[in-house]
Amino acid sequence: MHPHEYNLNLAGFMLEEIEDYILSPEVFWPLSKRSPTGSPLPRLTLGGLILTLNELKAQERDMSPSQRADHDKLLLQMERVRVKWAVGLERKAAQELRSRLNLWRAYLNDIQERVDTAENYPYEVRNRVMFEHLADLSIRQPEIQPLVGEMRSLDTRLMSIFVVGAFVWDVRLEDIYPQSAFWYLYGLPRPPN
């Protein structure tokens, strides 16, 4: 998990450009800003924005009062976007859904072909989590049903090599991602023999 100062800046930069992003054909939008350290920022995606906002929610108790106020402003801004751009958000989420499915499928293939190892799982599983959030956002889009079906097949595949264990992300996120809904965050895959 990134420090909350980084997440506050990143979410702010993403929300500054969200309307242009929604109106564009791009799935992975390059942000025009740079981090305060000058390093490049990740591209804007709805999945990335949702994960960043969830990290901030988990970090609230670590924030100063002014940072909590900034966080509240970001949440209000996101709610305004959801109301104003509901259909655009659904369409953009459906567009990103296919990319997240493909990235997750490729990772599972790599594990089963022993090209990748489980040590990358905590990073790679982000695509599976993003898929879940994006599917929720785009549920009314008819084209997502086959993609959800494909993901369920990949879940079955993962279950066959999954060893239940500890939560793979920062423990502060456990309340946001309960095991009942996000079982794939509670353990690691083992490559087939």
Image (cartoon, rainbow, N blue to C red):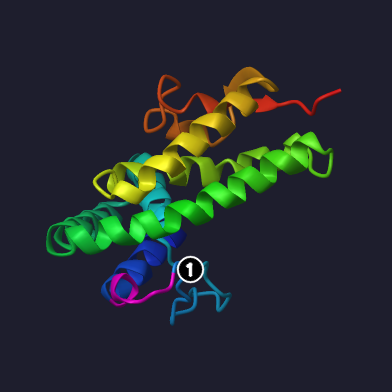
Picture quarter containing residue 8?
bottom left
**98 relative to 121, above or below:** below
State the extent of the magenta-drawn residues as a range: 20-26
> What amino acid type is highlighted by mark number 1?
Phe
Please, which residue is most extreme toward the bottom here?
32
> Residue shown at 44%/80% (left/top)?
33
**98 relative to 58, above or below:** below
Q: Looking at the image, which is closer to me, 127 or 11?
A: 127
> Residue shown at 40%/25% (left/top)?
181
Q: Looking at the image, which is closer to me, 111 or 75?
A: 111
Q: Which residue is mark 1?
A: 28
Residue 165 picture location, percent across and down: 62, 18
Residue 146 picture location, percent across and down: 43, 42
Question: Total marks drawn?
Answer: 1
> Residue shown at 41%/31% (left/top)?
177
117 sits left or right of 77 in the view: right
User: Does the magenta segment cover residue 22?
Assistant: yes
**19 relative to 67, above or below:** below
121 sits left or right of 34 in the view: right
85 sits left or right of 9 in the view: left
Residue 142 picture location, percent across and down: 30, 47
Residue 12 picture location, percent across and down: 33, 67
116 sits left or right of 94 in the view: right
Q: Secondary structure at mark 1?
A: loop
User: Does the magenta segment cover residue 140?
Assistant: no
> Residue shown at 58%/33% (left/top)?
154
Q: Split into 4 quadrants, where in the image is the C terminus? A: top right
